[in-house]
Amino acid sequence: MTTPACIADFVAAAGRDLAHPEAGEIADADLAKAMTAAVRLYAARVEARDRFPAPLEAGEVTATDVAITASEMIRAVDMNLFDLSMWHGRPRNQG
């Protein structure tokens, strides 16, 4: 399967932004739109397929990257760590 051009373009723009994250070409609002769409699509696929594909490319993000992003996502939907621990502890199909 080939990568759609829009994904390749976004990944390239994100790579350029990583060199200058304080003033990148992707606006904060556009990044939020892309992340929102990606999170919704990932969750819908997990629910529909009853399996958990890799949500990230291995070795491409750090634990700090994940902690910062996950913390802000948890705040954005007004969850707390107790709620998250209940979801984390639920059984999952390894399919």
Image: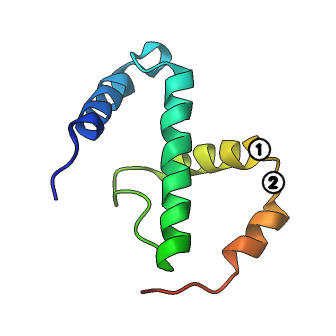
Q: Which mark is residue 79?
A: 2
Q: Which mark is residue 75?
A: 1
Judge whether 25 appears above or below 58 on screen: above
Going by the numbered disc 1, the residue's amino acid type is: Arg
Quadrant in the picture for residue 86: bottom right
| Secondary structure state at the residue bearing disc 2 | loop
Query: Residue at coordinates 52% horizontally, 87% vertically from top-left?
Result: 93
Going by the numbered disc 2, the residue's amino acid type is: Met
Q: Residues within 10 Å of mark 1 (few under 14, many from 20)?
A: few
Query: Residue at coordinates 40% horizontally, 66% vertically from top-left?
Result: 54
Judge whether 1 appears above or below 13 on screen: below
Image spot of residue 30 (x, y percent): 50, 25
Query: Residue at coordinates 25% horizontally, 31% vertically from top-left?
Result: 9
Quadrant in the picture for residue 44: bottom right
2 on left or right of 71: left
Judge whether 10 appears above or below 83 on screen: above
- Where the N terminus falls, by quadrant? bottom left
Image spot of residue 68 (x, y percent): 61, 43
Which residue occupies the extreme left position in the image? 2
Which residue occupies the extreme top position in the image? 23
Q: Are marks 2 and 1 in contact (CB under 8 Å)?
A: yes
Image spot of residue 23 (x, y percent): 45, 12
Image spot of residue 21 (x, y percent): 45, 22
- Where the C terminus falls, by quadrant? bottom left
